[in-house]
Image (cartoon, rainbow, N blue to C red):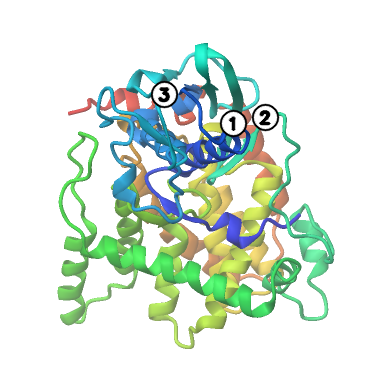
């Protein structure tokens, strides 16, 4: 089972893939479906956010995102500034331009947050309804935001974003490694999957575009300054850190690891500010893969476009295994499912481009994931800021360490990647909901919001 790199690495907006991008896509999908049946649009719409979407929705901008989606905005192409205030700043008595074409009555009270009603299908559940004249129900859809910006519509046969036709399939790391024969790498297997859906030039162009978007996000974050929104008063630090590193670099001091951490901070500060970001595999963990790839591109001789593609394809293969057998959603598995997954993907990608064998690459991913087991998701005030931003910087360093540890071995190890992914799944299932993106435990209740 291979999930395309173009689904795992989707271009969107911050601050959350599951709480911003996913609900926005759900709203956009709902508007499209309703307008297909009722071209004139409904009289009014209502949205109910449940569970984690409601518990941390205000901090994640979820109401703004779903309303922006209902207005026809797409997270990949919209101006991020147009999303902020779509709900919170909507003028009283002003209609909503449903799907971008049909004015409908709308008030901020039409979005209801219900954090305490547990939905059995998924903790990130939202219901959207459309009404016609005399309150006649025109449409009633339930969506699940399952992590990484992926959504599922309840009652619909799920067409997983898998491109496995025409290639040997794999669902486990052991099966993936069994395909790596006659010199085939994990990236080669992933590329074969991509080639079932698009030609080689399109694959390369798409991967290059992902890298360009990641690099642009890093550069934007390194240039930005000020205080992040949300009320915690968290200052952006990537720019001042960059300036400090440049001074140290000019003085001949070793700064390689400092650059790695600055790259990660830059991305996650952009994400926290609601900017353009690449989900990798989530927004809360979006800084790790770009930071490690920037580190590789900047400091490893011989880094080129082909190596960047190898990195991304290898990471996608590992992400596919995690998504298929556990979760990449903080609301399902805690932060181990987000930062742990991203760290494993980055470690695998770096190990591959540094010349690691498939067995060493699998080992690198296992090391990285193993040392994030049990990591909780407890964002203060429901914002993707504390501890999320620094956590990405630390995990980027862990990814590099994991890759280098694996390269110093022969690929044999006691704990398999399959075992650690299953352990992550079980740990997430056992974890209290307080520690799964609800802000009802951990740092979220022990640090006073100022």
Q: Position of residue 210 (x, y in %)?
A: 49, 67
Label 2 CA crowd tier, 10 Å (few <14, some 14–19, many 20+): some
- At 40% across and 72% down in the image, what residue appears? 295
Between marks 3 and 1, how big is the CA–CA gap?
A: 17 Å
Query: Label 1 vs label 2: CA separation?
Result: 6 Å
**On the picture, is 290 further left or further right than 124?**
left
Q: Is residue 275 above or below residue 337?
A: below
Q: According to the image, label 2 marks what residue?
A: 154
Left or right of 122, for residue 79: left
Give the crowd class for mark 1: few <14, some 14-19, many >=20 residues within 10 Å.
many
Secondary structure beneath label 1: strand
Q: Are marks 1 and 2 in contact (CB under 8 Å)?
A: yes
For label 3, the residue is 55
Residue 32 lies in what quarter of the image?
top right
Could you tell me which secondary element the residue under label 2 belongs to?
Answer: loop
Where residue 165 sits: x, y (%)?
Answer: 82, 61
Q: Is residue 432 visible?
A: no
Front label number (3 vs 1): 1
Tell me the quarter of the image containing the C terminus.
Answer: top left
The mark total stands at: 3
Question: How packed is label 3: few (under 14 Cα within 10 Å), some, or many (20 or more)?
Answer: many
Q: Mark 2 against mark 3, which lies toward the viewer?
A: 2
Judged from this view, the residue extending furthest toward the top is: 134
Q: Secondary structure at mark 3?
A: helix
When the figure is inspected, residue 250 is found, relative to residue 413, above or below; the finding is: below
Nearer-N-terminus badge (1/2):
1
Quarter of the image that includes the N terminus: bottom right
**Residue under numbered circle 1:** 143
The mark nearer the N terminus, 2 or 3, is: 3
């Amino acid at each position: 089972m291979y999930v395309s790199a173009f689904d795992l690495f989707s271009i969107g907006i911050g601050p959350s893939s599951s709480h911003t991008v996913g609900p926005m896509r759900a709203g956009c999908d709902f508007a499209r479906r309703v307008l297909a049946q009722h071209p004139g649009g409904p009289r009014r719409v209502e949205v109910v956010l449940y569970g984690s979407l409601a518990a941390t929705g205000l901090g994640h901008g979820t109401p703004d995102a779903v309303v922006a989606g209902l207005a026809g905005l797409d997270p990949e192409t919209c101006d991020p500034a147009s999303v902020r205030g779509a709900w919170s700043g909507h003028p009283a008595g002003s209609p909503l331009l449903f799907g971008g074409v049909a004015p409908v009555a709308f008030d901020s009270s039409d979005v209801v947050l219900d954090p305490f009603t547990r939905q059995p299908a998924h903790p990130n559940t939202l219901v959207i309804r459309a009404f016609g004249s005399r309150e006649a129900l025109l449409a009633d859809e339930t969506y699940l935001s399952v992590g990484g910006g992926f959504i599922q519509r309840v009652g619909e046969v799920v067409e997983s974003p898998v491109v496995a036709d025409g290639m040997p399939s794999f669902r486990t790391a052991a099966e993936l490694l069994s395909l790596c024969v006659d010199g085939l790498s994990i990236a080669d297997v992933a590329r074969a999957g991509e080639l079932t859906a698009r030609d080689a030039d399109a694959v390369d162009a798409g991967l290059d575009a992902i890298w360009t978007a990641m690099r642009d996000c890093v550069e934007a974050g390194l240039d930005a300054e000020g205080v992040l929104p949300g009320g915690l008063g968290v200052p952006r630090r990537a720019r001042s850190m960059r300036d400090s590193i440049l001074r140290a670099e000019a003085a001949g001091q070793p700064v390689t690891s400092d650059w790695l951490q600055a790259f990660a901070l830059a991305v996650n500060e952009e994400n926290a500010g609601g900017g353009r970001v690449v989900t990798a595999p989530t927004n809360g963990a979006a800084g790790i893969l770009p930071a490690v790839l920037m580190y590789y591109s900047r400091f490893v001789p011989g880094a080129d476009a082909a190596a960047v593609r190898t990195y991304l394809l290898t990471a996608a293969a590992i992400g596919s295994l995690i998504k298929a057998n556990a979760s990449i959603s903080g609301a399902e598995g805690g932060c181990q499912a987000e930062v742990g997954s991203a760290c494993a993907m980055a470690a695998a990608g770096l190990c591959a481009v540094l010349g690691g064998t498939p067995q060493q690459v699998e080992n690198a991913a296992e090391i990285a994931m193993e040392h994030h087991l049990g990591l909780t998701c407890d964002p203060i005030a429901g914002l993707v800021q504390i501890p999320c931003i620094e956590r990405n910087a630390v995990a980027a360093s862990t990814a590099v360490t994991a890759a280098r540890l694996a390269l110093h071995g022969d690929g044999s190890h006691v704990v398999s990647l399959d075992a650690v992914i299953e352990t992550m799944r079980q740990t997430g299932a056992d974890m209290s909901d307080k520690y799964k993106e609800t802000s009802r435990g951990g740092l979220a209740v022990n640090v006073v919001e100022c």
